Image (cartoon, rainbow, N blue to C red):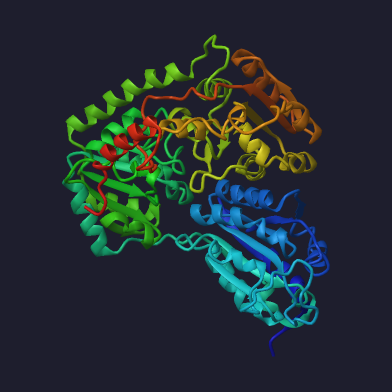
Amino acid sequence: MTATIRLTMAQALVRAMAAQTVEIDGATTSVFAGVWAIFGHGNVAGLGEALYGARDSLPTFRAHNEQAMAHAAVAFAKASRRRRMMACATSIGPGATNMVTAAAVAHVNRLPVLLLPGDVFASRRPDPVLQQIESFSDATVSANDCLRPVSRYFDRLTRPEQLIPAFERAMAVLTDPAECGPVTLALCQDVQTEAYDYPASLFEERVWTSRRSRPDASELRSAAALLAKAEKPLVIAGGGVLYSEAEERLRAFCEARGYPVVETQAGKSSLPDDHALNLGAVGVTGTGAANALAEEADVILAVGTRLQDFTTGSWSLFRNPARRIIGLNAQPFDAGKHRAQPLVADAQAGLDDLDVALGRAGSPPAWRERIAAEKAAWAPTAARYTQASNADLPSDAQVIGAVQRTSERSDVVVCAAGGLPGELHKLWRAGAPGGYHMEYGYSCMGYEIAGGLGVAMALPDRRVTVMVGDGSYLMMNSEIASAVMLGVSFTIVILDNRGFGCINRLQRATGGASFNNLLADARHERLPAIDFVAHAASLGAAAEKVDGLSSLEEALRRARGRSGVSAIVIDTDPLASTDAGGHWWDVAVPEVSDRAEVRDARARYEEALRDQRIGD
Protein backbone atom coordinates (compact mmCIF):
# COMPACT_ATOMS: atom_id res chain seq x y z
CA MET A 1 0.00 0.00 0.00
CA THR A 2 1.37 3.43 -0.96
CA ALA A 3 2.44 5.47 2.05
CA THR A 4 0.72 8.84 2.28
CA ILE A 5 1.02 12.01 4.34
CA ARG A 6 -1.99 14.21 4.97
CA LEU A 7 -1.14 17.84 4.35
CA THR A 8 -2.70 20.97 3.00
CA MET A 9 -1.82 21.73 -0.58
CA ALA A 10 0.40 24.64 0.55
CA GLN A 11 2.20 22.44 3.11
CA ALA A 12 2.76 19.77 0.47
CA LEU A 13 4.14 22.30 -2.01
CA VAL A 14 6.59 23.73 0.50
CA ARG A 15 7.74 20.28 1.65
CA ALA A 16 8.24 19.15 -1.96
CA MET A 17 10.26 22.28 -2.74
CA ALA A 18 12.52 21.67 0.25
CA ALA A 19 13.21 18.13 -0.98
CA GLN A 20 14.70 19.25 -4.33
CA THR A 21 18.50 19.23 -4.41
CA VAL A 22 21.30 19.75 -6.89
CA GLU A 23 24.90 18.59 -6.98
CA ILE A 24 27.44 21.39 -7.50
CA ASP A 25 31.19 20.71 -7.41
CA GLY A 26 30.62 17.39 -5.67
CA ALA A 27 28.42 18.79 -2.92
CA THR A 28 24.64 18.48 -2.68
CA THR A 29 22.63 21.57 -1.83
CA SER A 30 19.03 22.70 -2.14
CA VAL A 31 17.70 23.75 -5.53
CA PHE A 32 15.56 26.43 -3.91
CA ALA A 33 17.67 28.88 -1.91
CA GLY A 34 14.52 30.36 -0.42
CA VAL A 35 11.18 32.01 -1.03
CA TRP A 36 10.63 35.73 -1.37
CA ALA A 37 7.21 36.51 0.03
CA ILE A 38 4.88 39.45 0.48
CA PHE A 39 1.75 38.25 2.24
CA GLY A 40 -1.82 39.35 1.67
CA HIS A 41 -5.26 37.87 2.18
CA GLY A 42 -4.70 35.56 -0.81
CA ASN A 43 -1.74 33.70 0.68
CA VAL A 44 -1.09 34.59 4.31
CA ALA A 45 -3.31 31.91 5.86
CA GLY A 46 -2.50 29.03 3.50
CA LEU A 47 0.99 29.43 2.06
CA GLY A 48 2.10 31.71 4.88
CA GLU A 49 1.41 29.06 7.52
CA ALA A 50 3.15 26.43 5.39
CA LEU A 51 6.28 28.56 4.93
CA TYR A 52 6.40 29.26 8.66
CA GLY A 53 6.43 25.53 9.34
CA ALA A 54 9.36 25.02 6.95
CA ARG A 55 11.32 28.18 7.80
CA ASP A 56 14.41 26.20 8.85
CA SER A 57 14.59 24.03 5.72
CA LEU A 58 13.26 26.59 3.22
CA PRO A 59 14.04 30.19 4.26
CA THR A 60 11.46 32.91 3.66
CA PHE A 61 12.69 36.41 2.84
CA ARG A 62 10.50 39.49 3.24
CA ALA A 63 10.67 41.97 0.38
CA HIS A 64 9.24 45.46 -0.16
CA ASN A 65 8.00 45.19 -3.74
CA GLU A 66 6.82 42.14 -5.67
CA GLN A 67 8.51 43.09 -8.93
CA ALA A 68 11.76 43.81 -7.11
CA MET A 69 11.79 40.53 -5.21
CA ALA A 70 11.24 38.64 -8.45
CA HIS A 71 14.14 40.58 -10.02
CA ALA A 72 16.29 39.51 -7.07
CA ALA A 73 15.25 35.90 -7.63
CA VAL A 74 16.01 36.11 -11.35
CA ALA A 75 19.44 37.64 -10.67
CA PHE A 76 20.17 34.92 -8.12
CA ALA A 77 19.41 32.25 -10.71
CA LYS A 78 21.58 33.93 -13.34
CA ALA A 79 24.51 34.34 -10.95
CA SER A 80 24.03 30.68 -9.97
CA ARG A 81 24.22 29.71 -13.67
CA ARG A 82 20.68 28.33 -13.48
CA ARG A 83 21.73 25.56 -11.09
CA ARG A 84 19.87 27.08 -8.12
CA MET A 85 16.84 29.33 -7.98
CA MET A 86 14.26 31.02 -5.78
CA ALA A 87 10.48 31.21 -5.58
CA CYS A 88 8.30 34.30 -5.19
CA ALA A 89 4.97 34.24 -3.34
CA THR A 90 2.33 36.96 -3.53
CA SER A 91 -1.30 37.53 -2.77
CA ILE A 92 -3.86 37.80 -5.55
CA GLY A 93 -4.44 41.06 -7.41
CA PRO A 94 -1.74 43.76 -7.56
CA GLY A 95 0.81 41.58 -5.80
CA ALA A 96 0.55 39.03 -8.56
CA THR A 97 0.44 41.46 -11.48
CA ASN A 98 3.46 43.31 -10.07
CA MET A 99 5.50 40.22 -10.99
CA VAL A 100 4.61 40.30 -14.69
CA THR A 101 7.55 42.51 -15.66
CA ALA A 102 10.04 40.38 -13.76
CA ALA A 103 8.54 37.25 -15.29
CA ALA A 104 9.17 38.76 -18.71
CA VAL A 105 12.79 39.40 -17.72
CA ALA A 106 13.17 35.74 -16.78
CA HIS A 107 11.37 34.56 -19.93
CA VAL A 108 13.52 36.61 -22.32
CA ASN A 109 16.74 35.64 -20.55
CA ARG A 110 15.83 31.94 -20.20
CA LEU A 111 16.18 32.01 -16.41
CA PRO A 112 14.34 29.89 -13.82
CA VAL A 113 12.07 31.38 -11.18
CA LEU A 114 9.03 29.80 -9.53
CA LEU A 115 6.15 32.25 -9.19
CA LEU A 116 3.47 31.40 -6.62
CA PRO A 117 0.71 34.00 -6.79
CA GLY A 118 -2.46 33.51 -4.80
CA ASP A 119 -5.63 33.16 -6.86
CA VAL A 120 -9.40 33.42 -6.52
CA PHE A 121 -11.53 30.85 -4.68
CA ALA A 122 -11.86 27.68 -6.72
CA SER A 123 -15.22 27.08 -5.04
CA ARG A 124 -16.39 30.55 -6.17
CA ARG A 125 -18.47 30.80 -3.01
CA PRO A 126 -17.43 34.36 -2.12
CA ASP A 127 -17.12 35.67 -5.69
CA PRO A 128 -16.16 38.36 -6.39
CA VAL A 129 -13.50 38.29 -3.70
CA LEU A 130 -11.39 41.35 -2.88
CA GLN A 131 -8.92 42.15 -5.75
CA GLN A 132 -10.62 39.72 -8.13
CA ILE A 133 -10.58 40.59 -11.83
CA GLU A 134 -13.91 39.67 -13.43
CA SER A 135 -14.25 38.88 -17.11
CA PHE A 136 -17.74 39.46 -18.52
CA SER A 137 -17.32 36.50 -20.89
CA ASP A 138 -15.02 34.00 -19.15
CA ALA A 139 -15.52 32.98 -15.52
CA THR A 140 -12.16 31.16 -15.41
CA VAL A 141 -10.10 34.33 -15.95
CA SER A 142 -8.20 35.90 -13.06
CA ALA A 143 -5.47 38.52 -12.76
CA ASN A 144 -2.93 35.72 -12.93
CA ASP A 145 -3.76 35.10 -16.57
CA CYS A 146 -1.48 38.09 -17.23
CA LEU A 147 1.36 35.74 -16.35
CA ARG A 148 0.52 33.18 -19.05
CA PRO A 149 2.44 34.77 -21.96
CA VAL A 150 5.52 35.38 -19.80
CA SER A 151 5.62 31.87 -18.26
CA ARG A 152 7.24 28.80 -19.77
CA TYR A 153 4.71 26.75 -17.85
CA PHE A 154 1.48 27.95 -16.23
CA ASP A 155 -0.99 26.06 -14.09
CA ARG A 156 -3.86 27.07 -11.83
CA LEU A 157 -4.42 24.61 -9.00
CA THR A 158 -8.14 24.25 -8.36
CA ARG A 159 -7.90 20.95 -6.43
CA PRO A 160 -5.22 19.91 -3.94
CA GLU A 161 -4.26 16.71 -5.79
CA GLN A 162 -3.42 18.71 -8.90
CA LEU A 163 -0.19 19.68 -7.17
CA ILE A 164 1.31 16.24 -7.83
CA PRO A 165 1.56 16.43 -11.66
CA ALA A 166 1.89 20.24 -11.64
CA PHE A 167 4.95 20.26 -9.41
CA GLU A 168 6.60 17.50 -11.45
CA ARG A 169 6.08 19.49 -14.63
CA ALA A 170 7.24 22.71 -12.98
CA MET A 171 10.53 21.17 -11.89
CA ALA A 172 11.08 19.62 -15.32
CA VAL A 173 10.78 23.06 -16.96
CA LEU A 174 12.81 24.93 -14.34
CA THR A 175 15.74 22.54 -14.69
CA ASP A 176 15.66 21.92 -18.45
CA PRO A 177 18.44 23.72 -20.39
CA ALA A 178 16.20 24.26 -23.41
CA GLU A 179 12.83 24.96 -21.77
CA CYS A 180 14.21 26.87 -18.79
CA GLY A 181 12.27 29.95 -17.77
CA PRO A 182 9.65 31.22 -15.33
CA VAL A 183 7.01 28.82 -14.04
CA THR A 184 3.74 30.05 -12.55
CA LEU A 185 1.65 27.93 -10.22
CA ALA A 186 -1.42 30.01 -9.40
CA LEU A 187 -2.68 28.87 -6.00
CA CYS A 188 -6.40 29.27 -5.40
CA GLN A 189 -6.61 30.58 -1.87
CA ASP A 190 -9.15 28.06 -0.64
CA VAL A 191 -7.26 25.15 -2.23
CA GLN A 192 -4.05 26.24 -0.45
CA THR A 193 -5.75 25.28 2.83
CA GLU A 194 -7.45 22.05 1.71
CA ALA A 195 -5.95 18.75 2.87
CA TYR A 196 -5.14 15.67 0.79
CA ASP A 197 -3.37 12.35 1.40
CA TYR A 198 -0.23 12.97 -0.66
CA PRO A 199 2.08 10.10 -1.62
CA ALA A 200 5.20 10.17 0.56
CA SER A 201 7.32 9.83 -2.60
CA LEU A 202 6.49 13.45 -3.45
CA PHE A 203 8.64 14.52 -0.51
CA GLU A 204 11.64 12.25 -1.06
CA GLU A 205 14.91 13.99 -1.83
CA ARG A 206 15.52 14.34 -5.54
CA VAL A 207 18.88 15.31 -7.01
CA TRP A 208 18.72 17.29 -10.23
CA THR A 209 21.67 17.28 -12.61
CA SER A 210 22.39 19.42 -15.66
CA ARG A 211 21.39 17.66 -18.85
CA ARG A 212 24.11 17.96 -21.48
CA SER A 213 22.50 17.10 -24.78
CA ARG A 214 24.92 16.06 -27.50
CA PRO A 215 24.57 17.13 -31.13
CA ASP A 216 22.92 15.08 -33.82
CA ALA A 217 25.52 13.36 -35.99
CA SER A 218 24.22 14.86 -39.22
CA GLU A 219 24.07 18.40 -37.82
CA LEU A 220 27.56 17.96 -36.42
CA ARG A 221 28.98 16.89 -39.79
CA SER A 222 27.37 19.85 -41.53
CA ALA A 223 28.57 22.34 -38.95
CA ALA A 224 32.10 20.97 -38.95
CA ALA A 225 32.25 21.04 -42.76
CA LEU A 226 31.25 24.71 -42.78
CA LEU A 227 33.71 25.70 -40.09
CA ALA A 228 36.59 23.69 -41.54
CA LYS A 229 36.41 25.69 -44.78
CA ALA A 230 36.19 29.09 -43.08
CA GLU A 231 38.75 31.69 -44.06
CA LYS A 232 37.42 34.23 -41.58
CA PRO A 233 35.76 32.36 -38.71
CA LEU A 234 34.20 34.15 -35.74
CA VAL A 235 32.79 32.79 -32.47
CA ILE A 236 30.00 34.64 -30.64
CA ALA A 237 29.85 33.77 -26.95
CA GLY A 238 26.33 34.12 -25.57
CA GLY A 239 24.86 33.54 -22.14
CA GLY A 240 24.57 29.82 -22.86
CA VAL A 241 28.36 29.53 -22.52
CA LEU A 242 28.17 30.62 -18.89
CA TYR A 243 24.98 28.70 -18.10
CA SER A 244 26.68 25.56 -19.42
CA GLU A 245 29.87 26.35 -17.48
CA ALA A 246 31.62 26.02 -20.82
CA GLU A 247 34.01 28.96 -20.58
CA GLU A 248 37.12 26.78 -20.16
CA ARG A 249 35.99 24.56 -23.02
CA LEU A 250 35.46 27.62 -25.18
CA ARG A 251 38.90 28.92 -24.30
CA ALA A 252 40.64 25.66 -25.21
CA PHE A 253 38.58 25.24 -28.39
CA CYS A 254 39.44 28.72 -29.67
CA GLU A 255 43.07 28.68 -28.55
CA ALA A 256 43.67 25.44 -30.45
CA ARG A 257 42.38 26.99 -33.67
CA GLY A 258 43.01 30.70 -33.34
CA TYR A 259 39.32 31.55 -33.50
CA PRO A 260 38.45 35.11 -32.38
CA VAL A 261 35.72 35.44 -29.75
CA VAL A 262 33.20 38.27 -29.44
CA GLU A 263 30.68 38.52 -26.63
CA THR A 264 27.00 39.38 -26.23
CA GLN A 265 25.75 41.20 -23.16
CA ALA A 266 24.82 37.87 -21.55
CA GLY A 267 28.02 36.17 -22.70
CA LYS A 268 30.48 38.84 -21.59
CA SER A 269 33.07 37.42 -19.14
CA SER A 270 33.09 34.04 -20.91
CA LEU A 271 36.75 34.83 -21.53
CA PRO A 272 38.74 37.37 -19.52
CA ASP A 273 38.97 40.71 -21.26
CA ASP A 274 42.75 40.46 -21.58
CA HIS A 275 42.68 37.12 -23.41
CA ALA A 276 44.44 37.48 -26.76
CA LEU A 277 41.47 36.08 -28.71
CA ASN A 278 38.76 38.06 -26.91
CA LEU A 279 37.80 41.08 -29.00
CA GLY A 280 35.06 42.08 -26.57
CA ALA A 281 31.53 43.25 -27.13
CA VAL A 282 29.81 42.74 -30.46
CA GLY A 283 27.00 44.59 -32.20
CA VAL A 284 25.29 47.91 -31.51
CA THR A 285 27.26 48.35 -28.30
CA GLY A 286 30.30 46.53 -29.63
CA THR A 287 34.00 47.34 -29.71
CA GLY A 288 35.66 48.52 -32.88
CA ALA A 289 37.74 45.33 -32.90
CA ALA A 290 34.82 42.91 -32.59
CA ASN A 291 32.66 44.65 -35.16
CA ALA A 292 35.47 45.00 -37.68
CA LEU A 293 35.90 41.23 -37.78
CA ALA A 294 32.16 40.55 -37.57
CA GLU A 295 31.62 42.57 -40.75
CA GLU A 296 34.04 40.32 -42.65
CA ALA A 297 33.38 36.94 -41.04
CA ASP A 298 32.41 34.16 -43.45
CA VAL A 299 31.42 31.54 -40.82
CA ILE A 300 29.95 32.62 -37.49
CA LEU A 301 29.70 30.06 -34.71
CA ALA A 302 26.99 31.48 -32.42
CA VAL A 303 27.26 29.65 -29.08
CA GLY A 304 24.37 29.98 -26.64
CA THR A 305 22.94 33.22 -28.02
CA ARG A 306 19.47 34.09 -29.25
CA LEU A 307 20.94 36.60 -31.74
CA GLN A 308 18.83 39.59 -30.77
CA ASP A 309 19.10 42.84 -32.70
CA PHE A 310 21.76 44.42 -30.52
CA THR A 311 24.04 41.47 -31.27
CA THR A 312 23.45 41.53 -35.03
CA GLY A 313 23.24 45.29 -35.53
CA SER A 314 19.61 44.77 -36.50
CA TRP A 315 20.88 42.23 -39.04
CA SER A 316 23.19 44.68 -40.78
CA LEU A 317 26.49 43.79 -39.07
CA PHE A 318 27.46 40.56 -40.85
CA ARG A 319 28.22 42.02 -44.27
CA ASN A 320 30.11 39.21 -45.97
CA PRO A 321 27.65 38.08 -48.68
CA ALA A 322 28.89 34.51 -48.34
CA ARG A 323 28.58 34.41 -44.57
CA ARG A 324 26.98 31.41 -42.86
CA ILE A 325 25.86 31.04 -39.25
CA ILE A 326 26.14 27.91 -37.11
CA GLY A 327 23.69 28.04 -34.22
CA LEU A 328 25.05 25.97 -31.32
CA ASN A 329 22.22 26.14 -28.82
CA ALA A 330 20.30 23.88 -26.45
CA GLN A 331 17.04 25.37 -27.74
CA PRO A 332 16.13 24.53 -31.39
CA PHE A 333 14.13 27.77 -31.63
CA ASP A 334 17.36 29.74 -31.20
CA ALA A 335 19.68 27.35 -33.04
CA GLY A 336 17.95 27.77 -36.40
CA LYS A 337 17.41 31.52 -36.46
CA HIS A 338 18.09 33.36 -39.72
CA ARG A 339 18.74 30.25 -41.76
CA ALA A 340 21.54 29.14 -39.48
CA GLN A 341 22.95 25.64 -39.66
CA PRO A 342 21.51 24.31 -36.37
CA LEU A 343 23.70 22.44 -33.95
CA VAL A 344 21.28 21.64 -31.15
CA ALA A 345 23.32 20.75 -28.09
CA ASP A 346 24.58 21.87 -24.74
CA ALA A 347 27.35 24.42 -25.28
CA GLN A 348 30.02 22.38 -23.51
CA ALA A 349 29.05 19.07 -25.14
CA GLY A 350 28.65 20.71 -28.53
CA LEU A 351 32.10 22.27 -28.41
CA ASP A 352 33.57 18.95 -27.29
CA ASP A 353 32.13 17.10 -30.28
CA LEU A 354 32.84 19.91 -32.71
CA ASP A 355 36.44 19.94 -31.56
CA VAL A 356 36.83 16.28 -32.47
CA ALA A 357 35.00 16.64 -35.79
CA LEU A 358 37.17 19.58 -36.89
CA GLY A 359 40.45 17.77 -36.48
CA ARG A 360 43.27 20.28 -36.99
CA ALA A 361 41.26 22.95 -38.84
CA GLY A 362 41.83 26.53 -37.73
CA SER A 363 42.12 30.17 -38.70
CA PRO A 364 44.49 31.10 -41.55
CA PRO A 365 47.59 33.10 -40.51
CA ALA A 366 46.28 36.31 -42.09
CA TRP A 367 43.10 36.18 -40.00
CA ARG A 368 45.08 35.58 -36.82
CA GLU A 369 47.15 38.65 -37.60
CA ARG A 370 43.97 40.69 -38.03
CA ILE A 371 42.75 39.52 -34.61
CA ALA A 372 45.89 40.75 -32.90
CA ALA A 373 45.97 44.03 -34.83
CA GLU A 374 42.33 44.93 -34.14
CA LYS A 375 42.62 44.08 -30.45
CA ALA A 376 45.76 46.18 -30.13
CA ALA A 377 44.12 49.11 -31.92
CA TRP A 378 41.01 49.08 -29.73
CA ALA A 379 42.78 49.03 -26.34
CA PRO A 380 44.12 52.63 -26.39
CA THR A 381 40.84 53.85 -27.87
CA ALA A 382 38.86 52.39 -24.99
CA ALA A 383 41.35 53.68 -22.45
CA ARG A 384 40.98 57.21 -23.78
CA TYR A 385 37.28 57.24 -22.88
CA THR A 386 37.66 55.77 -19.39
CA GLN A 387 40.61 57.84 -18.20
CA ALA A 388 40.02 60.60 -15.69
CA SER A 389 39.78 64.22 -16.78
CA ASN A 390 39.16 67.63 -15.25
CA ALA A 391 35.74 68.10 -16.84
CA ASP A 392 33.09 69.61 -14.58
CA LEU A 393 30.80 66.60 -15.16
CA PRO A 394 32.34 63.20 -15.91
CA SER A 395 30.91 60.91 -18.57
CA ASP A 396 29.47 57.48 -17.81
CA ALA A 397 32.63 56.01 -19.35
CA GLN A 398 34.86 57.93 -16.96
CA VAL A 399 32.83 56.73 -13.99
CA ILE A 400 33.22 53.17 -15.31
CA GLY A 401 36.97 53.76 -15.45
CA ALA A 402 37.02 54.84 -11.81
CA VAL A 403 35.04 51.76 -10.73
CA GLN A 404 37.35 49.55 -12.79
CA ARG A 405 40.51 51.03 -11.25
CA THR A 406 39.29 50.20 -7.75
CA SER A 407 38.01 46.70 -8.58
CA GLU A 408 39.54 43.25 -8.36
CA ARG A 409 39.39 40.54 -11.03
CA SER A 410 36.82 38.57 -9.05
CA ASP A 411 34.41 41.52 -8.72
CA VAL A 412 30.94 41.51 -10.27
CA VAL A 413 29.43 44.60 -11.90
CA VAL A 414 25.62 44.67 -12.18
CA CYS A 415 23.55 46.88 -14.46
CA ALA A 416 20.45 46.73 -16.66
CA ALA A 417 19.17 49.70 -18.64
CA GLY A 418 19.84 53.16 -20.00
CA GLY A 419 23.17 54.34 -21.40
CA LEU A 420 25.32 52.38 -18.96
CA PRO A 421 24.84 48.95 -20.61
CA GLY A 422 26.29 50.22 -23.88
CA GLU A 423 29.27 51.82 -22.18
CA LEU A 424 29.88 48.83 -19.91
CA HIS A 425 29.58 46.34 -22.77
CA LYS A 426 32.29 48.17 -24.72
CA LEU A 427 34.52 49.28 -21.88
CA TRP A 428 34.26 47.04 -18.81
CA ARG A 429 37.20 44.65 -18.54
CA ALA A 430 35.78 41.50 -17.00
CA GLY A 431 38.34 39.43 -15.15
CA ALA A 432 36.48 36.25 -14.19
CA PRO A 433 33.42 34.31 -15.40
CA GLY A 434 30.22 35.84 -14.12
CA GLY A 435 31.98 39.11 -13.36
CA TYR A 436 29.69 40.99 -15.73
CA HIS A 437 26.00 40.70 -14.85
CA MET A 438 23.84 42.63 -17.28
CA GLU A 439 20.09 42.30 -17.71
CA TYR A 440 19.83 43.42 -21.31
CA GLY A 441 17.56 40.81 -22.80
CA TYR A 442 14.58 42.86 -21.60
CA SER A 443 16.55 46.03 -20.79
CA CYS A 444 14.46 46.47 -17.66
CA MET A 445 14.83 49.69 -15.73
CA GLY A 446 14.58 49.04 -12.01
CA TYR A 447 16.35 45.67 -12.13
CA GLU A 448 19.70 47.00 -10.96
CA ILE A 449 19.46 47.27 -7.17
CA ALA A 450 17.19 44.25 -6.71
CA GLY A 451 19.43 42.36 -9.11
CA GLY A 452 22.49 43.35 -7.10
CA LEU A 453 20.82 41.91 -4.01
CA GLY A 454 20.20 38.61 -5.80
CA VAL A 455 23.76 38.42 -7.14
CA ALA A 456 25.27 39.20 -3.74
CA MET A 457 23.16 36.45 -2.16
CA ALA A 458 24.30 33.97 -4.81
CA LEU A 459 27.97 34.99 -4.74
CA PRO A 460 28.72 36.08 -1.15
CA ASP A 461 32.49 35.70 -1.65
CA ARG A 462 32.65 38.20 -4.55
CA ARG A 463 32.34 41.96 -4.26
CA VAL A 464 29.28 43.25 -6.14
CA THR A 465 29.01 46.78 -7.53
CA VAL A 466 25.71 48.01 -8.94
CA MET A 467 25.86 50.86 -11.44
CA VAL A 468 22.55 52.63 -11.87
CA GLY A 469 21.31 55.88 -13.33
CA ASP A 470 19.07 58.26 -11.41
CA GLY A 471 16.11 57.31 -13.61
CA SER A 472 16.31 53.61 -12.78
CA TYR A 473 17.06 54.36 -9.14
CA LEU A 474 13.84 56.34 -8.83
CA MET A 475 11.85 53.53 -10.46
CA MET A 476 12.91 50.90 -7.95
CA ASN A 477 15.11 51.23 -4.90
CA SER A 478 13.17 49.56 -2.09
CA GLU A 479 15.37 46.49 -1.92
CA ILE A 480 18.14 48.54 -0.35
CA ALA A 481 16.05 48.08 2.79
CA SER A 482 15.72 44.34 2.13
CA ALA A 483 19.48 44.00 1.70
CA VAL A 484 20.14 45.90 4.91
CA MET A 485 17.64 43.74 6.77
CA LEU A 486 19.28 40.55 5.47
CA GLY A 487 22.85 41.72 6.12
CA VAL A 488 23.83 41.50 2.45
CA SER A 489 26.74 43.64 1.28
CA PHE A 490 27.22 45.44 -2.03
CA THR A 491 28.00 48.88 -3.41
CA ILE A 492 25.66 51.07 -5.46
CA VAL A 493 27.09 53.79 -7.69
CA ILE A 494 24.30 56.23 -8.62
CA LEU A 495 25.05 58.30 -11.71
CA ASP A 496 22.84 61.38 -11.62
CA ASN A 497 22.38 63.01 -15.02
CA ARG A 498 19.01 64.46 -14.01
CA GLY A 499 16.73 62.43 -16.21
CA PHE A 500 16.68 59.72 -18.81
CA GLY A 501 19.94 60.74 -20.51
CA CYS A 502 20.21 57.69 -22.77
CA ILE A 503 16.81 58.12 -24.39
CA ASN A 504 17.39 61.86 -24.67
CA ARG A 505 20.48 61.10 -26.77
CA LEU A 506 18.52 58.63 -28.89
CA GLN A 507 15.73 61.19 -29.29
CA ARG A 508 18.21 63.74 -30.58
CA ALA A 509 19.96 61.20 -32.82
CA THR A 510 16.65 60.46 -34.57
CA GLY A 511 16.05 64.13 -35.21
CA GLY A 512 13.79 64.81 -32.27
CA ALA A 513 14.01 67.77 -29.93
CA SER A 514 14.95 67.10 -26.32
CA PHE A 515 11.52 66.50 -24.81
CA ASN A 516 10.20 64.77 -21.69
CA ASN A 517 13.41 62.83 -20.94
CA LEU A 518 15.71 65.14 -19.00
CA LEU A 519 13.93 66.74 -16.08
CA ALA A 520 14.68 70.21 -17.43
CA ASP A 521 12.97 69.34 -20.75
CA ALA A 522 9.82 67.91 -19.15
CA ARG A 523 6.75 69.93 -18.18
CA HIS A 524 7.42 71.35 -14.75
CA GLU A 525 6.57 74.12 -12.35
CA ARG A 526 9.91 73.71 -10.64
CA LEU A 527 12.71 71.18 -10.88
CA PRO A 528 12.97 68.65 -8.05
CA ALA A 529 16.14 68.79 -5.95
CA ILE A 530 16.44 65.06 -5.31
CA ASP A 531 18.77 64.15 -2.46
CA PHE A 532 19.80 60.59 -3.34
CA VAL A 533 22.21 60.46 -0.39
CA ALA A 534 19.47 61.22 2.10
CA HIS A 535 17.11 58.80 0.43
CA ALA A 536 19.55 55.87 0.34
CA ALA A 537 20.58 56.60 3.92
CA SER A 538 16.95 56.55 5.01
CA LEU A 539 16.73 52.98 3.72
CA GLY A 540 19.79 51.96 5.74
CA ALA A 541 22.68 52.43 3.30
CA ALA A 542 25.95 54.12 4.15
CA ALA A 543 25.57 56.95 1.63
CA GLU A 544 27.70 59.81 0.40
CA LYS A 545 28.02 62.15 -2.58
CA VAL A 546 31.35 62.72 -4.30
CA ASP A 547 32.46 65.74 -6.30
CA GLY A 548 34.66 64.06 -8.90
CA LEU A 549 36.42 60.96 -10.11
CA SER A 550 39.26 60.95 -7.60
CA SER A 551 36.74 61.36 -4.77
CA LEU A 552 34.71 58.52 -6.29
CA GLU A 553 37.72 56.20 -6.22
CA GLU A 554 38.36 57.05 -2.57
CA ALA A 555 34.71 56.38 -1.72
CA LEU A 556 34.76 53.06 -3.57
CA ARG A 557 37.80 51.95 -1.57
CA ARG A 558 36.05 52.92 1.65
CA ALA A 559 33.00 50.91 0.61
CA ARG A 560 35.12 47.79 0.07
CA GLY A 561 36.16 47.94 3.69
CA ARG A 562 32.68 47.99 5.18
CA SER A 563 29.81 45.53 5.33
CA GLY A 564 26.25 46.30 4.34
CA VAL A 565 25.01 48.47 1.49
CA SER A 566 27.07 51.48 0.41
CA ALA A 567 25.58 54.09 -1.93
CA ILE A 568 27.79 56.62 -3.73
CA VAL A 569 26.25 59.44 -5.76
CA ILE A 570 28.06 61.33 -8.52
CA ASP A 571 26.74 63.93 -10.97
CA THR A 572 27.38 63.05 -14.62
CA ASP A 573 27.08 64.57 -18.08
CA PRO A 574 23.77 63.59 -19.76
CA LEU A 575 25.08 64.20 -23.29
CA ALA A 576 28.52 62.54 -23.36
CA SER A 577 28.85 58.96 -24.64
CA THR A 578 31.47 56.78 -26.31
CA ASP A 579 31.30 57.37 -30.05
CA ALA A 580 34.00 54.84 -30.90
CA GLY A 581 32.95 51.32 -31.77
CA GLY A 582 29.25 50.55 -31.91
CA HIS A 583 27.01 49.84 -34.87
CA TRP A 584 23.74 50.99 -36.38
CA TRP A 585 20.52 50.03 -34.61
CA ASP A 586 17.14 49.97 -36.33
CA VAL A 587 15.02 52.62 -34.59
CA ALA A 588 12.35 53.77 -37.02
CA VAL A 589 12.26 57.48 -37.85
CA PRO A 590 9.02 59.25 -38.97
CA GLU A 591 8.56 59.51 -42.73
CA VAL A 592 6.81 62.88 -42.36
CA SER A 593 7.76 65.72 -40.03
CA ASP A 594 7.77 69.52 -39.87
CA ARG A 595 11.28 69.36 -38.41
CA ALA A 596 14.22 69.44 -40.81
CA GLU A 597 16.24 67.45 -38.27
CA VAL A 598 13.74 64.58 -38.44
CA ARG A 599 13.70 64.64 -42.25
CA ASP A 600 17.51 64.45 -42.29
CA ALA A 601 17.43 61.59 -39.79
CA ARG A 602 14.87 59.78 -41.97
CA ALA A 603 17.18 60.07 -44.99
CA ARG A 604 20.04 58.57 -42.97
CA TYR A 605 17.70 55.85 -41.73
CA GLU A 606 16.62 54.86 -45.24
CA GLU A 607 20.27 54.71 -46.31
CA ALA A 608 21.10 52.42 -43.38
CA LEU A 609 18.19 50.10 -44.17
CA ARG A 610 19.97 49.08 -47.36
CA ASP A 611 22.56 47.23 -45.30
CA GLN A 612 20.01 45.01 -43.58
CA ARG A 613 20.18 41.38 -44.64
CA ILE A 614 16.96 39.68 -43.65
CA GLY A 615 16.62 36.09 -44.77
CA ASP A 616 19.55 35.97 -47.20
Measured from the top left, where is residue 339 in percent x and y?
26, 57
Does any portion of residue 164 appear in the rendered image?
yes
The quadrant holding residue 257 is: top left
226, 492: nearer the viewer: 492
Q: Residue furthest bottom?
A: 1
Give the side of residue 443 with respect to residue 236, left or right.
Answer: right
Q: 574 above or below 2?
A: above
Residue at image location 69% in from the left, 25% down from the top: 559
Q: 367 above or below 156?
A: above
Residue at image location 43% in from the left, 40% down from the top: 270
Does any portion of residue 462 appear in the rendered image?
no
The quadrant holding residue 368 is: top left
Measured from the top left, where is residue 524 in percent x and y?
67, 31
Q: 399 above or below 354?
A: above
Give the side of residue 343 with respect to residue 416, left or right.
Answer: left
Residue at image location 25% in from the left, 47% down from the top: 613
Q: 524 above or below 244?
A: above
591, 72: nearer the viewer: 591
520, 131: nearer the viewer: 520
Measured from the top left, where is residue 60 in percent x and y?
76, 56
